[in-house]
Image (cartoon, rainbow, N blue to C red):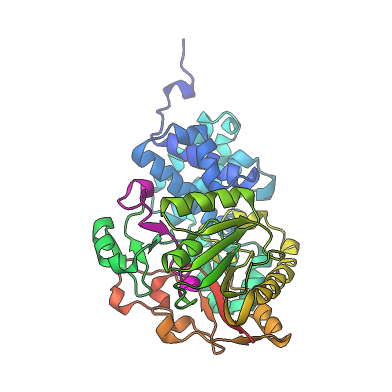
Amino acid sequence: MARTPDDTRQEATGWESRLAAAELVLAATDRGVDFEAAMYASRAFGRLEGSDRGFARAMASMALRALGRIDWALGGMVERPLSDIEPPLRALLRVGAAQLWLMDVARHAAVSATVEAARKWDIARRGGGLVNAVLRRASREGEIFAEAPATSVWPDWLAARMKAALGPEMADVMALAQLEEPPVDLTLKSADEAEMWAEQLGARVLASGSLRLEAATGLSEMPGFAEGAWWVQDTAAALPARLMGDVSGKAVADLCAAPGGKAMQLAAMGAKLTAIDISKQRTVRLRENAERAMLAMDIVEADARTWKPGAPLDGVLLDAPCSALGVMRRHPEGVWRRDPKDLARLPSIQRSLVDAAHGMLKPGGRLVYAVCTPLPEEGRDVIEAAIAAGGWRRAPVTEAEAPGFEHALTPEGDVLTLPSAGLQSGADASHDTEDTLNPDAFFIARLERL
């Protein structure tokens, strides 16, 4: 019997990892699943091992980081709107484009293996010809992606808000930083052991006091994890607790405390700590983390806006609920599921928490306010409104208190950290600045109760 072309066609290698990557992208973009949860749920990803698994994760992660910019460039290569293309085929195109434009994968391998994945994937099989045609064009016309606006990685509404908040140049830098895998930093239970743990973990000590891992795989298997000698925490996220000052023996509350990184810092610093969170599920995780690190704290499941301490406190740390736009590079898929109208309610929640903290503190007590977003309406404006209403004065942060973040200090004495693009991970720690620290975006202010 005569063979059909499909009978004689040689199967392209590497299609399994491309199919798995497309499954992850499809789950994150069209089914509303968080990226980490998608990896647990994907059958194709679960069948991979070793380097194939890592490559699939890298392709999916890169496609999600550059999602808007990839779609902007692909939009000119298809005959109908990209939104009208079947979701599985759209996911494959995004994975293929990420390989071609951002990952230095050989053109032939990127195209042939991704097309093969379409042919092997039941829900995408009929679209193999489309995937082939578009990716072949993408392999020839990479300049279209290169010429796309940097901020096209985000939805239009977010790009506009970032430009308004940071200025066009800094918004571009933050957008470009999203295309890079963010660093993995550790906070130590005992700061005096930094050099010892850096040697054991293959990390370097940052000017801020955090450790930065050079290779961040198998974290739970690394020395020190099981006994809670360290925990994962971006170097900017570790700064608010340090700005509380000397809390040893003092009564302190951490509002909105889960999953517990800042609470563990305060407990390790000797605070008599009450850690409060409104979520039962997150409170369970907070308790598990505290027990792993063997750190003592009272953990309370409550709404911090109504909770009252038994006696006035010396200090409050408030990592307020926020838009989390400062950590988009860690969860880039999330921003595509957000409605900008939902963000409008956050400043009133943040302000009510600041007001609640005022009622918890003794006169002269200290509040450190933090949000992982650079938007002024969630940071600077909340603080200015609280000061204007009376009862607070700003306690400016000094350069000596924020090593490595000197350039992040605002004229008012607040802190605004921002990620940077194109940095070398092996930079000399003795010359670390806020730029070379490449932190997440955080706004931090310190107030004292009058």
Tag count in the figure?
0
Residue at 41% across, 34% down = 48
Classify 402 as above or below 282: below
Classify 58 as above or below 406: above
Q: Nearer the viewer, residue 264 or 182?
A: 264
- Percent of width and height locating residue 93: 55, 45
| Left or right: residue 286 compared with residue 232 | right
| Left or right: residue 395 compared with residue 56 | right
Q: Nearer the viewer, residue 38 or 80?
A: 38
The C terminus lies in quadrant? bottom right
- Percent of width and height locating residue 29: 61, 47
Quadrant housing residue 26: top right
Q: Is residue 234 magenta?
A: yes
Residue at 39% across, 44% down = 54
Classify 230 as above or below 6: below
- Percent of width and height locating residue 43: 51, 32
- Percent of width and height locating residue 278: 66, 56
| Left or right: residue 330 compared with residue 50 | right
Q: Nearer the viewer, residue 227 or 92?
A: 227
Residue farthest toward the bottom in the current orientation of the protein: 411
Q: Is residue 144 magenta?
A: no
Let me know if residue 16 appears in the view.
yes
Let me know if residue 426 appears in the view.
no
Residue farthest toward the front in the current orientation of the protein: 310
Q: Nearer the viewer, residue 106 or 399?
A: 399
Residue at 46% across, 40% down = 18
Residue at 39% across, 78% down = 404
SS assignment for the magenta stretch, majority: loop
Classify 255 as above or below 444: above
Residue farthest toward the top in the current orientation of the protein: 1
Quadrant housing residue 214: bottom left
* Magenta-highlighted residues: 218-242
